[in-house]
Image (cartoon, helix red, strand yellow):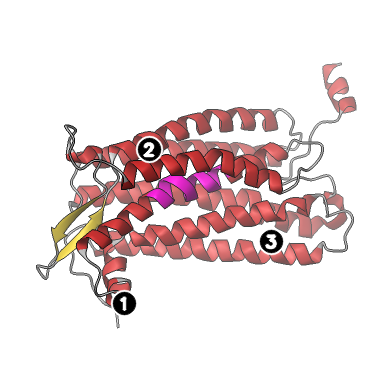
Amino acid sequence: MIVLPSIPHPDFAIDLATLSLISVLLLLSFLSLCLIFYFKFKTHNSYYLQSFNALWTVRFLLVFFIILWSLTEALRLPFFRKHYIYPFFEDLTLGQQASLCKLHLVLSLGLLEPGFLVTLLFLLLVSIKKRTPRGSWAFLFLLATCLPLSSLQFLFVFFQSSRSEFPCWFRRSSVIVRDGSHSRIVLCSSPFLSISLFGAFAAVYGLYFLFSCWSVVSLVINKKLRVRTYTLAFTVLITVTLQVLFLVLSLFWEPGELTFGVVEFIEFLSTFTCAAVGQGILVIIPIVDSLAVGGDCCRWYPIITQTKTEEESKEESV
Protein backbone atom coordinates (compact mmCIF):
# COMPACT_ATOMS: atom_id res chain seq x y z
CA MET A 1 0.00 0.00 0.00
CA ILE A 2 1.49 3.34 -1.07
CA VAL A 3 1.22 6.12 1.49
CA LEU A 4 0.76 9.49 -0.16
CA PRO A 5 2.25 12.46 1.66
CA SER A 6 0.14 15.24 3.07
CA ILE A 7 2.79 17.92 3.26
CA PRO A 8 2.69 21.23 1.38
CA HIS A 9 6.00 21.53 -0.48
CA PRO A 10 8.22 20.10 -1.80
CA ASP A 11 5.43 17.95 -3.13
CA PHE A 12 5.27 14.22 -3.62
CA ALA A 13 6.82 14.32 -7.12
CA ILE A 14 10.03 15.97 -5.89
CA ASP A 15 10.33 13.66 -2.89
CA LEU A 16 9.64 10.61 -5.05
CA ALA A 17 12.24 11.67 -7.62
CA THR A 18 14.82 12.24 -4.88
CA LEU A 19 14.13 8.88 -3.24
CA SER A 20 14.33 7.17 -6.64
CA LEU A 21 17.73 8.68 -7.35
CA ILE A 22 18.92 7.74 -3.87
CA SER A 23 17.85 4.14 -4.60
CA VAL A 24 19.73 4.18 -7.91
CA LEU A 25 22.88 5.50 -6.22
CA LEU A 26 22.63 2.85 -3.49
CA LEU A 27 22.30 0.11 -6.12
CA LEU A 28 25.30 1.51 -7.98
CA SER A 29 27.26 1.62 -4.73
CA PHE A 30 26.28 -1.98 -3.96
CA LEU A 31 27.57 -3.00 -7.40
CA SER A 32 30.82 -1.14 -6.71
CA LEU A 33 31.26 -2.94 -3.38
CA CYS A 34 30.65 -6.31 -5.04
CA LEU A 35 33.27 -5.54 -7.68
CA ILE A 36 35.77 -4.30 -5.09
CA PHE A 37 35.53 -7.43 -2.94
CA TYR A 38 35.36 -9.77 -5.94
CA PHE A 39 38.47 -8.15 -7.41
CA LYS A 40 40.18 -8.36 -4.01
CA PHE A 41 39.48 -12.09 -3.89
CA LYS A 42 40.42 -12.54 -7.55
CA THR A 43 43.80 -10.82 -7.18
CA HIS A 44 44.77 -12.43 -3.89
CA ASN A 45 47.31 -14.70 -5.55
CA SER A 46 47.98 -12.62 -8.65
CA TYR A 47 51.35 -10.87 -8.81
CA TYR A 48 50.42 -8.68 -11.78
CA LEU A 49 47.22 -7.30 -10.28
CA GLN A 50 48.52 -6.63 -6.77
CA SER A 51 49.79 -3.12 -7.60
CA PHE A 52 46.43 -2.03 -8.95
CA ASN A 53 44.50 -3.55 -6.05
CA ALA A 54 46.75 -2.05 -3.36
CA LEU A 55 44.26 0.79 -2.87
CA TRP A 56 41.12 -1.32 -2.59
CA THR A 57 40.51 0.16 0.89
CA VAL A 58 40.48 3.68 -0.60
CA ARG A 59 37.91 2.67 -3.22
CA PHE A 60 35.87 1.05 -0.48
CA LEU A 61 36.10 4.29 1.52
CA LEU A 62 34.86 6.27 -1.49
CA VAL A 63 31.82 4.03 -1.91
CA PHE A 64 31.20 3.99 1.86
CA PHE A 65 31.08 7.80 2.00
CA ILE A 66 28.65 7.88 -0.93
CA ILE A 67 26.36 5.32 0.71
CA LEU A 68 26.26 7.26 3.97
CA TRP A 69 25.65 10.52 2.11
CA SER A 70 22.74 8.93 0.25
CA LEU A 71 21.17 7.73 3.49
CA THR A 72 21.55 11.08 5.22
CA GLU A 73 19.95 12.83 2.24
CA ALA A 74 16.79 10.85 2.97
CA LEU A 75 16.71 12.42 6.45
CA ARG A 76 15.98 15.87 5.06
CA LEU A 77 12.97 14.69 3.03
CA PRO A 78 9.75 15.48 4.93
CA PHE A 79 7.92 12.55 3.32
CA PHE A 80 10.62 10.06 4.38
CA ARG A 81 10.89 11.41 7.91
CA LYS A 82 7.15 11.62 8.46
CA HIS A 83 6.29 8.12 7.23
CA TYR A 84 9.44 6.10 7.98
CA ILE A 85 11.07 7.72 11.03
CA TYR A 86 8.49 9.52 13.12
CA PRO A 87 6.14 6.48 13.46
CA PHE A 88 8.96 4.64 15.27
CA PHE A 89 9.81 7.66 17.44
CA GLU A 90 6.43 9.13 18.31
CA ASP A 91 7.82 11.06 21.27
CA LEU A 92 10.11 13.21 19.12
CA THR A 93 9.54 16.88 19.88
CA LEU A 94 9.81 19.63 17.29
CA GLY A 95 13.17 20.56 18.78
CA GLN A 96 14.45 17.01 18.37
CA GLN A 97 13.16 16.94 14.81
CA ALA A 98 15.06 20.17 14.16
CA SER A 99 18.17 18.48 15.57
CA LEU A 100 17.84 15.83 12.85
CA CYS A 101 18.08 18.61 10.28
CA LYS A 102 21.18 19.96 12.01
CA LEU A 103 22.70 16.49 12.07
CA HIS A 104 22.02 16.05 8.36
CA LEU A 105 23.61 19.42 7.63
CA VAL A 106 26.81 18.69 9.55
CA LEU A 107 27.18 15.18 8.13
CA SER A 108 26.37 16.16 4.55
CA LEU A 109 28.28 19.43 4.08
CA GLY A 110 30.88 18.88 6.79
CA LEU A 111 31.94 15.25 6.52
CA LEU A 112 30.38 12.89 3.96
CA GLU A 113 30.37 14.95 0.78
CA PRO A 114 33.81 16.51 1.43
CA GLY A 115 34.92 12.98 2.32
CA PHE A 116 34.08 11.40 -1.01
CA LEU A 117 35.35 14.47 -2.90
CA VAL A 118 38.71 14.26 -1.13
CA THR A 119 38.84 10.50 -1.78
CA LEU A 120 38.23 11.17 -5.48
CA LEU A 121 41.13 13.62 -5.45
CA PHE A 122 43.40 11.15 -3.67
CA LEU A 123 42.70 8.41 -6.22
CA LEU A 124 43.38 10.89 -9.01
CA LEU A 125 46.68 12.01 -7.48
CA VAL A 126 48.07 8.51 -6.94
CA SER A 127 47.27 7.60 -10.55
CA ILE A 128 50.44 9.41 -11.65
CA LYS A 129 52.68 8.13 -8.86
CA LYS A 130 55.41 5.66 -9.75
CA ARG A 131 54.76 3.78 -6.52
CA THR A 132 51.29 3.15 -5.16
CA PRO A 133 51.11 4.58 -1.62
CA ARG A 134 49.52 2.78 1.27
CA GLY A 135 45.83 3.18 1.97
CA SER A 136 46.65 4.72 5.36
CA TRP A 137 47.78 7.88 3.56
CA ALA A 138 44.23 8.34 2.33
CA PHE A 139 42.93 8.32 5.91
CA LEU A 140 45.48 10.93 6.95
CA PHE A 141 44.58 12.99 3.88
CA LEU A 142 40.89 12.77 4.84
CA LEU A 143 41.46 13.65 8.49
CA ALA A 144 43.59 16.66 7.63
CA THR A 145 40.91 17.97 5.28
CA CYS A 146 37.54 16.93 6.70
CA LEU A 147 38.14 17.14 10.45
CA PRO A 148 38.56 20.95 10.53
CA LEU A 149 35.65 21.41 8.12
CA SER A 150 33.25 19.16 10.04
CA SER A 151 34.28 20.72 13.35
CA LEU A 152 33.53 24.22 12.09
CA GLN A 153 30.20 23.08 10.63
CA PHE A 154 29.31 21.52 13.98
CA LEU A 155 30.13 24.73 15.84
CA PHE A 156 28.23 26.91 13.36
CA VAL A 157 25.12 24.71 13.39
CA PHE A 158 24.80 23.51 16.99
CA PHE A 159 26.39 26.33 18.98
CA GLN A 160 25.07 29.47 17.38
CA SER A 161 23.50 32.27 19.34
CA SER A 162 19.73 32.62 19.01
CA ARG A 163 20.06 36.37 19.43
CA SER A 164 21.74 38.04 16.51
CA GLU A 165 21.42 41.16 14.45
CA PHE A 166 21.72 39.03 11.30
CA PRO A 167 18.57 37.81 9.48
CA CYS A 168 17.17 34.35 10.29
CA TRP A 169 18.39 32.75 7.04
CA PHE A 170 21.94 33.53 8.14
CA ARG A 171 21.81 30.79 10.80
CA ARG A 172 18.53 28.91 10.22
CA SER A 173 18.81 25.15 9.65
CA SER A 174 15.09 24.32 9.81
CA VAL A 175 11.61 25.84 9.89
CA ILE A 176 8.27 24.64 11.28
CA VAL A 177 5.28 24.55 8.92
CA ARG A 178 1.82 22.97 8.94
CA ASP A 179 1.06 20.07 6.62
CA GLY A 180 -2.22 19.11 4.98
CA SER A 181 -3.55 17.58 8.20
CA HIS A 182 -2.82 20.84 10.06
CA SER A 183 -0.10 19.21 12.15
CA ARG A 184 3.28 20.84 12.44
CA ILE A 185 6.31 19.41 10.65
CA VAL A 186 9.97 20.46 10.51
CA LEU A 187 11.54 21.23 7.11
CA CYS A 188 15.31 21.36 6.72
CA SER A 189 17.23 24.25 5.19
CA SER A 190 20.86 25.35 4.82
CA PRO A 191 22.05 28.47 6.70
CA PHE A 192 24.30 31.02 5.07
CA LEU A 193 27.17 30.26 7.47
CA SER A 194 27.27 26.58 6.49
CA ILE A 195 26.95 27.39 2.80
CA SER A 196 29.81 29.89 3.02
CA LEU A 197 32.07 27.38 4.74
CA PHE A 198 31.31 24.67 2.18
CA GLY A 199 31.71 27.21 -0.64
CA ALA A 200 35.20 28.10 0.59
CA PHE A 201 36.10 24.40 0.66
CA ALA A 202 34.65 23.93 -2.84
CA ALA A 203 36.68 26.84 -4.23
CA VAL A 204 39.99 25.51 -2.89
CA TYR A 205 39.10 21.96 -3.84
CA GLY A 206 38.09 22.93 -7.38
CA LEU A 207 41.40 24.67 -8.07
CA TYR A 208 43.45 21.79 -6.69
CA PHE A 209 41.36 19.21 -8.55
CA LEU A 210 41.76 21.15 -11.81
CA PHE A 211 45.54 21.28 -11.33
CA SER A 212 45.64 17.54 -10.57
CA CYS A 213 43.61 16.69 -13.67
CA TRP A 214 45.94 18.81 -15.79
CA SER A 215 48.91 16.87 -14.38
CA VAL A 216 47.25 13.54 -15.18
CA VAL A 217 46.26 14.56 -18.72
CA SER A 218 49.80 15.71 -19.46
CA LEU A 219 51.04 12.17 -18.75
CA VAL A 220 48.27 10.11 -20.33
CA ILE A 221 49.14 8.58 -23.72
CA ASN A 222 45.87 6.73 -24.35
CA LYS A 223 43.07 8.78 -25.95
CA LYS A 224 40.40 6.68 -24.25
CA LEU A 225 41.90 7.28 -20.85
CA ARG A 226 42.31 10.96 -21.60
CA VAL A 227 38.59 11.20 -22.37
CA ARG A 228 37.84 9.57 -19.03
CA THR A 229 40.00 12.10 -17.23
CA TYR A 230 38.36 15.01 -19.04
CA THR A 231 34.93 13.60 -18.24
CA LEU A 232 35.78 13.24 -14.56
CA ALA A 233 37.24 16.75 -14.37
CA PHE A 234 34.31 18.36 -16.18
CA THR A 235 31.72 16.51 -14.09
CA VAL A 236 33.29 17.22 -10.70
CA LEU A 237 34.01 20.90 -11.35
CA ILE A 238 30.59 21.64 -12.88
CA THR A 239 28.54 19.73 -10.31
CA VAL A 240 30.35 21.16 -7.29
CA THR A 241 29.96 24.68 -8.70
CA LEU A 242 26.25 24.11 -9.40
CA GLN A 243 25.71 22.74 -5.91
CA VAL A 244 27.17 25.83 -4.25
CA LEU A 245 25.21 28.08 -6.62
CA PHE A 246 21.87 26.42 -5.84
CA LEU A 247 22.63 26.31 -2.14
CA VAL A 248 22.96 30.08 -2.28
CA LEU A 249 19.79 30.39 -4.38
CA SER A 250 17.85 28.39 -1.78
CA LEU A 251 18.29 31.30 0.64
CA PHE A 252 15.92 33.43 -1.44
CA TRP A 253 12.89 31.20 -0.77
CA GLU A 254 11.27 29.84 2.35
CA PRO A 255 11.30 26.07 3.03
CA GLY A 256 7.90 24.73 2.13
CA GLU A 257 7.61 26.73 -1.09
CA LEU A 258 7.60 24.85 -4.38
CA THR A 259 10.50 26.91 -5.79
CA PHE A 260 12.61 26.05 -2.74
CA GLY A 261 11.90 22.36 -3.32
CA VAL A 262 12.92 22.58 -6.98
CA VAL A 263 16.15 24.43 -6.14
CA GLU A 264 16.95 21.91 -3.41
CA PHE A 265 16.31 19.02 -5.82
CA ILE A 266 18.70 20.47 -8.43
CA GLU A 267 21.32 20.90 -5.72
CA PHE A 268 20.87 17.23 -4.77
CA LEU A 269 20.98 16.20 -8.44
CA SER A 270 24.37 17.91 -8.84
CA THR A 271 25.92 15.92 -6.01
CA PHE A 272 24.22 12.73 -7.20
CA THR A 273 25.79 13.14 -10.66
CA CYS A 274 29.23 13.77 -9.17
CA ALA A 275 29.01 10.67 -6.96
CA ALA A 276 27.70 8.41 -9.74
CA VAL A 277 30.29 9.50 -12.33
CA GLY A 278 33.10 9.34 -9.76
CA GLN A 279 32.22 5.76 -8.87
CA GLY A 280 31.92 4.80 -12.50
CA ILE A 281 35.27 6.22 -13.62
CA LEU A 282 37.39 5.48 -10.55
CA VAL A 283 35.88 2.21 -9.32
CA ILE A 284 33.65 0.31 -11.73
CA ILE A 285 35.33 0.89 -15.13
CA PRO A 286 38.92 0.33 -13.91
CA ILE A 287 38.01 -2.95 -12.18
CA VAL A 288 36.00 -4.22 -15.15
CA ASP A 289 38.85 -3.34 -17.53
CA SER A 290 41.40 -4.99 -15.26
CA LEU A 291 39.38 -8.20 -15.07
CA ALA A 292 39.04 -8.15 -18.86
CA VAL A 293 42.74 -7.77 -19.68
CA GLY A 294 44.16 -9.75 -16.76
CA GLY A 295 47.94 -9.58 -16.41
CA ASP A 296 48.37 -6.79 -18.94
CA CYS A 297 47.13 -4.27 -16.39
CA CYS A 298 50.10 -4.69 -14.06
CA ARG A 299 51.21 -1.13 -14.87
CA TRP A 300 47.76 0.41 -14.51
CA TYR A 301 46.75 2.55 -11.59
CA PRO A 302 43.46 3.62 -9.90
CA ILE A 303 42.22 5.60 -12.90
CA ILE A 304 43.98 3.20 -15.29
CA THR A 305 46.30 5.81 -16.72
CA GLN A 306 49.30 4.87 -18.81
CA THR A 307 52.03 7.44 -18.35
CA LYS A 308 54.80 8.37 -20.67
CA THR A 309 58.18 6.79 -20.10
CA GLU A 310 61.38 8.78 -20.36
CA GLU A 311 62.21 7.23 -23.74
CA GLU A 312 58.77 8.11 -25.17
CA SER A 313 59.13 11.68 -23.90
CA LYS A 314 62.50 11.99 -25.63
CA GLU A 315 61.08 10.62 -28.88
CA GLU A 316 58.25 13.17 -28.76
CA SER A 317 60.69 16.02 -28.15
CA VAL A 318 62.74 14.93 -31.16
* Magenta stretch, residue numbers: 106-118
Say what secondary structure mark 3 lies in: helix
Which residue is drawn at the image coordinates 64% and 28% (left, top)?
214
Q: Position of residue 173 (x, y in %)?
A: 27, 48
Image side of residue 152 versus residue 48, left or right = left
Q: Quadrant of the N terminus?
A: bottom left
Marks 3 and 2 in Cβ contact (< 8 Å): no
- Of callouts 3 and 2, which one flags the residue occurring earlier in the amino acid sequence? 3
* Residue 179 lies in quadrant: bottom left
How far apart marks 2 and 1 lie (CA) works out to 34 Å
Q: Residue under circle 1?
A: 88
Q: Amino acid at mark 1?
A: Phe
Image position of 209 (left or right of 265): right
Q: Quadrant of the C terminus?
A: top right
Please state the horizontal and vertical placement of residue 253, each as a whole percent of the image.
Answer: 19, 43
Say which of 96 and 14 sits in front.
Answer: 96
Residue 283 in the image: above or below residue 241: below
Query: Outermost residue, left direction?
Result: 182
Which residue, given by chain and number where applicable, does mark 2 sit on?
244
Say which residue appears at 37% left-offset and 62% top-offset.
74
For label 3, count other residues whose C-alpha is less than 10 Å away and answer few (under 14), some (14-19) or many (20+): many
Q: Residue at x 30, y 45 (%)?
A: 190
Q: Determine the image quadrant of residue 14.
A: bottom left
